[in-house]
Image (spheres, rainbow, N blue to C red):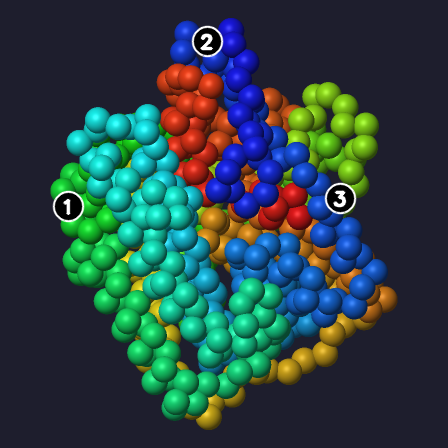
Amino acid sequence: MTRLVMGPFNRVEGDLEVTLDVVDGRVAEARVNAPLFRGFERMLEGRDPRDALVITPRICGICSVSQSAAAAQALAAAMGLVPAPAGAAMAALIHAAENVADHLTHFHLFFMPDFARPEYAGRPWHERAVERFTAMEGSAQRRAVQARAELLHVMGLLAGKWPHTLAIQPGGVTRAPGVREKARLAATLRAFRRYLEEVLFGGSLGAFAALATVDDLLAWGRGDVGLFLEIAADLGLERMGGGSGRYMSFGAYPLATGPVLARGVWDGKLRPLDEAAIAEDLSHAWMKGATAHPREGRTEPDESMASPAYSWCKAPRLAGQTVEVGALARQVVDGHPLARALAGGGVLARVTGRLLEIARTQEVMERLIAGIVPGAGYMARGQLPRQGEGAGLVEAARGSLGHWLRIEGGRIAGYQIIAPTTWNFSPRDGSGVPGPLEAALVGLEVAGDVPLSVQHVVRSFDPCMVCTVH
């Protein structure tokens, strides 16, 4: 047996270390370590509950709107407040724009540059990958960064700034868009659609969103998506880093009529999500305490860092089982036929989930803008209780994000957060069951000191370690 330690990973938000036990050229066992502790949950204790709206978005500069939305929902639940319908729609639009921008960044800047590496020289697609995706130089990257910046005009118009907006509140949003803002938002989305259809997909978003089988997907030979699919077929990315086939979604973009994307659990069939069945196992985390639901959980670092623990990341489980979260999980739970056909798949499935979500979310954002009614009420008002609790369950780009708030004496008595990467990059639990990434790496063929196969699987989950160790 050979032990291989990989880390820190570049193009990852935060610190990540992966330890692999390799037998006969394949991974026999993997352990994933989040080596940096930050402690945002501890910072919130004793503060005015409204401080969560200011502090939690600082957990991450990539998904700060997701943190804002979760904090606002937790406060609203504690207040017994229902957001104004128009405000909920604009909060959904702000959140959707951030998630799409995140998916675009992941594809162009985090994931695809690995295929421009010299190790792949001689592959029939390598020269095109170098021209399009070489770090800092690729022509696809330049266009994507420009398109992303223009999409984020949505933030300027509705959120005031990004990251760390205060526009999303428990009762709705602080900015009531008028006729002029509606027209500018529509123009922004038209320009973004042109980029997506002319460059990224090389064809109609509706046609891509209508794909139903893996064969149909792999036959899509247009745009940068077509180049990715050619690479995937050549390298066998469909078989690399497969998952358990268990997926969870908290439901994305809650509106007055319900979430835009469904809430639930998929394990071969769709089941309702029992939020009470969530618990965080601490057996292999450098944390003191016992397994508990986040409503009763604590964050008490164990400075001894004693074995068998090996990570600052806790191990969340749903009814005692691991679940994978992310764009693929959302699309599977929502019932998309292509996503269901890819369920249990690896690198190809996860990246396709994000591409599918980009195409489908563009239409969602356009509908939300078309539905803007100038002069409508965008904020409901309420009072914070002296005692109370609430949960904010949202879908960040990387998957299910939960905030659990407890108020006592008008102050925050407890605040627990489970981030998407906490689910996907968790360590083992008390039964020795590995987390989703750890399990996905087992059986992977590796070669060299920095095997690219491991890089592809890790990046297919799109880790954000600073959220994991909040």
Q: Which residue is mark 1?
A: 221
Rendered view: 219 above or below 153: above
Q: Is residue 329 visible?
A: no
Please provide percent x and percent y for residue 434: 54, 26
- Whichever of callouts 3 and 2 sits on the residue coming sooner in the sequence is 2
Q: Which residue is mark 3?
A: 299
Q: Are marks 3 and 1 in contact (CB under 8 Å)?
A: no
- Whichever of callouts 3 and 1 sits on the residue coming sooner in the sequence is 1
Q: Is residue 20 visible?
A: yes
Identity, as a three-letter code, of the amino acid under mark 3: Thr
- Whichever of callouts 2 and 1 sits on the residue coming sooner in the sequence is 2
Q: How many marks?
A: 3
Q: Which residue ends up furthest to the bottom in the rendered image?
A: 375
Rendered view: 34 above or below 385: above
Q: Are marks 2 and 1 in contact (CB under 8 Å)?
A: no
- Viewed as shown, does residue 147 lie left or right of 212? right
Nearer to me, 117 or 415: 117
